[in-house]
Amino acid sequence: MSGVRIGIDFDNTIICYDKVFAAVARQRGLVPESWDGLKTEVRDYLRSRAGGELAWQGLQGFVYGKGIGGAEIYPGVREFLATCRKAGTSVYIVSHKTQFGHQDPDRVDLREAARGWLRGAGLIDAAGAALAVGNIYFEDTLAAKVERLASLQLDIFIDDLVDVFEQPHFPKTTRSILFTQSRPPHPDHCEPIASWADIHRGVFAQ
């Protein structure tokens, strides 16, 4: 695997926000006190109510910024990155992340918040860190994200969103791993894998 180039999305692929979204939504009184749903369930619940889209955007702005410290790393990510490092595999983060969130009065820099989280998780700026700071890219749009990953000439890209792989300029030579627990159907060109342990096996057991 030496010389192989792997790209990974950030939000909901490396970092899991499920618990922090539910906790902050409860704190803000946006969901019942007993609520314990996933991020997508919080979103759908809010959007089903009057004014819910603005409430959702405000919640996102806080969680991705000031509240990011409450997010967790997905199980298996550390082990995968450690194997990449040992194998001489280059790893890049390529994420669609605007600098500032919608409905965020504090104007927190979301990209710096993400780098801070990566630093706190020991994934950058640490001895033996799995990722180089220069290999982290945050882009303003989905199209720019795909352009970036295409320019990096990646062998593999891992993302939780089908939309990324369905972009017309997504490189056909890049293996598409869809990090998802949802049921099929999935696009034929995507390889749905439900856990990082299975991604690890699928990439390094070739």
Image (cartoon, helix red, strand yellow):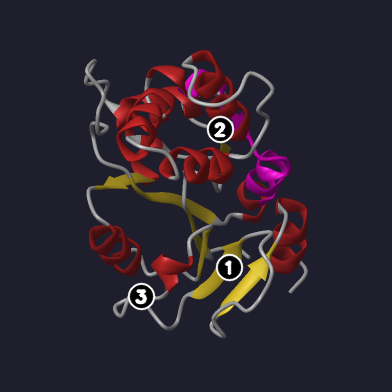
Front residue of 169/62: it is: 62
Q: Secondary structure at mark 1?
A: strand
On the image, numbered disc 2 is attached to which residue? 129
Mark 2 crowd level (few <14, some 14–19, many ≥20, 10 Å Cα): some
In the image, residue 137 above or below residue 141: above
For residue 111, say whether it is visible: yes
Q: Earlier in the sequence, mark 1 or mark 2?
A: 2
- Residue 136, by quadrant, is top left
Which residue is labeled 3 in the image?
A: 170
Q: Position of residue 8 (x, y in %)?
A: 49, 54
Q: Is residue 107 in the magenta section?
A: no
Give whichever of discs 3 and 2 has the lower sequence position. Answer: 2
* Residue appearing at x 61%, y 47% in the figure: 85
The percent position of residue 148, horizontal first and vertical second, equals 28, 60
Q: Residue at x 51, y 20 (%)?
A: 24
For disc 3, the neighbor class at 10 Å (few under 14, some 14 to 19, many from 20) is some
